[in-house]
Amino acid sequence: MKKSFVMMLAAVGLLFEVAAICSAQESDNAGKSFTVYPIGEVVKEGGKTTIVLEKKYQPGLLKLDDFTHVTVVYWFDRNDTPEKRSILQVHPQGNKKNPIRGVFATHSPVRPNLIAISRCRIISIKDNVIEIDGIDAFDGSPVLDLKN
């Protein structure tokens, strides 16, 4: 099945548009696209890891400090190439000693859609900044959502 994926970064507002274009014969999802708007970004500096939300999303943090952990949904934005999106089987953790698996049975950062999910311990929340114990994301990775 041939699919073409397009990611466009608009300079204003960090708009990510992910479009899946399929022939009508190949998929019921032909021509559907989804627009994803980051709500913030991962910031790693001075030995700390934080999620810095855009100020307009700060009200959504109300009562999050009642919990010990948060699920962070983010985008592997620096791993996006057509070649990497087409890899469907990997050796877990890149270790050839591990038996090959399908990407959907792993946490591999190479996959058809580069959505990543990590469960993180909350250290503190102040204003629009959540300090967490760490995350498998690069500094500046776009955060798409937070869930408890």
Image (cartoon, rainbow, N blue to C red):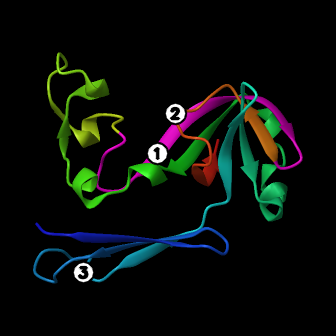
Q: Is residue 52 magenta?
A: no
Q: Is residue 25 above or below residue 13?
A: below
Is 108 placed left or right of 117 in the picture? left
Span highlighted in magenta in the image? 109-128
Is 3 placed left or right of 142 in the picture? left
The quadrant the N terminus occupies is bottom left
- Kind of residue sitting beneath label 3: Ala
Label 3 belongs to which residue? 30
Mark closer to the chain start, 2 or 1: 1
Is 32 placed left or right of 22 in the picture? right
Q: Nearer the viewer, residue 142 or 36?
A: 142
Q: Residues within 10 Å of mark 1 (few under 14, many from 20)?
A: some
Q: Nearer the viewer, mark 1 or mark 3?
A: 1
* The quadrant where residue 11 appears: bottom right
Q: SS of the residue at dot 2?
A: loop
Q: CA distance from mark 1 to mark 3?
A: 24 Å
Label 2 belongs to which residue? 136
Mark closer to the chain start, 1 or 3: 3
Q: Is residue 126 magenta?
A: yes
